[in-house]
Image: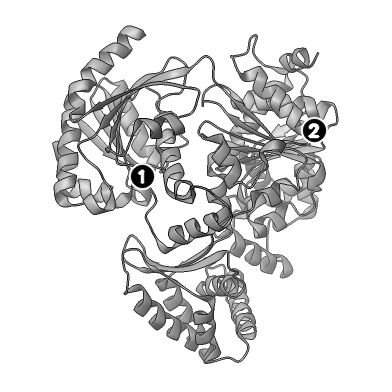
Amino acid sequence: MLESELRALSPYSSLRPGQLKIAKTVYMAVAQGLCAVIEAPCGLGKTIASLMGIALSLQRNLTRRVLWLTRTNDESDKVIEEARRLKDRGSPLRGLSLRGKSSSCPLLRGVNEELSHLACRVLRDESLCPYLDQEKVDQCADRLSREHDLATSVEVIQAAIKDRCCPVAVMKKLMRSSNILALTYPYVFNRYVHGAYLKFLQLHDTATIIDEAHNVMESAIEYESKALKANTLYNSIDELLNREVELAAPLVDLIGAFEGLVNSNPLQGVDVSREEILKIILRHFEDPFEYLERLRKVALEVIKTRALRGLTIRCPTYSIFTLLKKVLNADSDHIIWLHLDAEGGLCMEVRPLTYDFRRVASKFHGVVLMSGTLSPLSSFIKILNLKAENSKIIRYVRPKYGHVVFIVDRSISTSLKNRSEYLYKAIAYKLKAIRSNAKGGLGVFVPSYDILRALKAVGLKELMQGLTFIDEGKSSPSIEVFERFKNYVEEGADATLVSVIGGRLAEGIDISSRLMSVAAIVGLPMPEPTPYNLKKVERLQSLGFKRPHNAVFIEPAMRRVVQAVGRLIRSPLDRAVVILMDRRYSEPLIKKYMPKWLGYELRVSDSPPCLLQEALSSLKSEV
């Protein structure tokens, strides 16, 4: 009975192996209020299968609504587009994808989300926002509700701007009659954003799906953290000298103290105590919280002035206020960390060592976490502080999905102690040899932008045969780099795509072995032994983790590797060769962390190019 009802919701005449199991698991997690953890390959159809389970649970009134969390706004829109396909089969889904003020407001687009809310309040209070017409908001929302059971954020924004009304106000009105909302992680894990958009929701009758769940802990910690650069401190001092001079004095002392501390260990940085910062503030103010309040008032006045004058909304003093507030409220589970950024500038962060995901999950009626890269699942569940006995776990195992030949290059290691110009030259010439033995598209994934710059410095681009496209992060739009690479490969040219593991092109984008049948992963992308990571090891050990070093260093590294491999394997028929250029890739490591759905074999060599042609030939014959 259950299976037939789920099948009836599918937009396809038949389901792939594993899809029905996913749909049933999602349905049961919602029905029983459980936490489900699903590891299945990309391209299998997890989204449509999960939507089938959601639709049936809503149809049977087992939950009031479902939040679908994604990493990006574009991914949220895609969920709604997929949900529309079920509607033709009688699905009860009604809802939309959301975008915040910073990406939807015509006046405040591109502004920090928190600052945009403060500026919006000023414009609203002064009746200066031309888009805040409640009658137009109601009319736009009512028309959209009639025309679309399911609307993407892009459609809502376009309709609202056309009607000269506030897109966010239209979204908030539509949310109240929705039973599915697709939104990004901050709506749940950022307290400020959650309060601004979702405070009216009753979460006890709401289920949630967390897509790309391998990112959830890192993202949750990021949203609980605050960071600023020395330039922000200097700009805030300038701002305060023009308004309340005495408020600048503690910041001048902080800069001097910070520069002295970080110079003692410029590579990894240092941690400082809350008391050290408190002592500096107390030199000038008896009550540090009074000092914070005065900073806040100045910041709000700056934001108000800029908003009323139609200027770009920015306020360094508000950034200082939020960071110092975080510092003064930090407990033993936080670290205050000073370090140098990639450009050599001073950076200060307040960051929690752990995040209790169970506290958030317990607020929902049913939670589903899904990704293609969660292995080992027992470690993933433990780091989330979930109870294994209360978690429903499914792995997609049969049939195996795709096939990868891993070739481990045991002749080099990119560990910190081995890094040198000689190493980078050796890597560059090995990549040149791999390029000479591979036709079409080649991927090169490196652990960090530092190593990327080092390889460029020793002439990697000049050594490589054919065209080489390098994704350098902020200086070049990743998708544009990928599209140029793709166009040349599809025209039959030899082209190499170089990117950083964990970057936009190594995670969250479909490449497939048709475009890139060979990839080289340079090094093991382990996090560096910063004071933050070392303290995190100590903290996890105190919480009873048997192998805290693995949780902090090995597991994040291997998940990034698997994500990079996953760019090539997008269907059951994809076949690829992946060269792991670091002797630290051992058979036990690969066996433990590769997902169970992936078909693979392992070979070891000091000279990978010698095995490359043989491996490619074996894959072609297999196909």
Residue beneath the point at 43% across and 33% down: 562
**Residue nearest the viewer, comparing 390 with 487:** 390
**Residue nearest the viewer, comparing 360 with 458:** 360
Looking at the rendered structure, which numbered label has been put on residue 525?
Answer: 1
**Residue 458 in sight here:** yes
Using the numbered discs, state the Cα–Cα distance from disc 1 to disc 2 in whole angstroms: 39 Å
The three-letter amino acid code for the residue at tag 2 is: Gln
Q: Secondary structure at mark 2?
A: helix
Residue 248 in picture, x, y percent from top left: 49, 86
> Which residue extends farthest right?
61
Q: Quick check: 222 left or right of 150?
A: left
Q: Secondary structure at mark 1?
A: loop
Looking at the rendered structure, which numbered label has been put on residue 32?
Answer: 2
Q: Is residue 316 above or below residue 1?
A: below
**Residue 148 in sight here:** no
Residue 420 in picture, x, y percent from top left: 18, 52
The three-letter amino acid code for the residue at tag 1 is: Pro
Q: Quadrant of the N terminus?
A: top right
Q: Residues within 10 Å of mark 2 (few under 14, many from 20)?
A: few
Residue beneath the point at 18% across and 46% down: 423
**Residue nearest the viewer, comparing 369 with 79:** 369
Q: Is residue 270 above or below residue 368?
A: below
Residue beneath the point at 31% across and 50% down: 449
Q: Quadrant of residue 87?
A: top right
Which of the marked residues, 1 or 2, is nearer the chain's N terminus?
Answer: 2
Residue 397 in picture, x, y percent from top left: 54, 20
* Number of marks drawn: 2
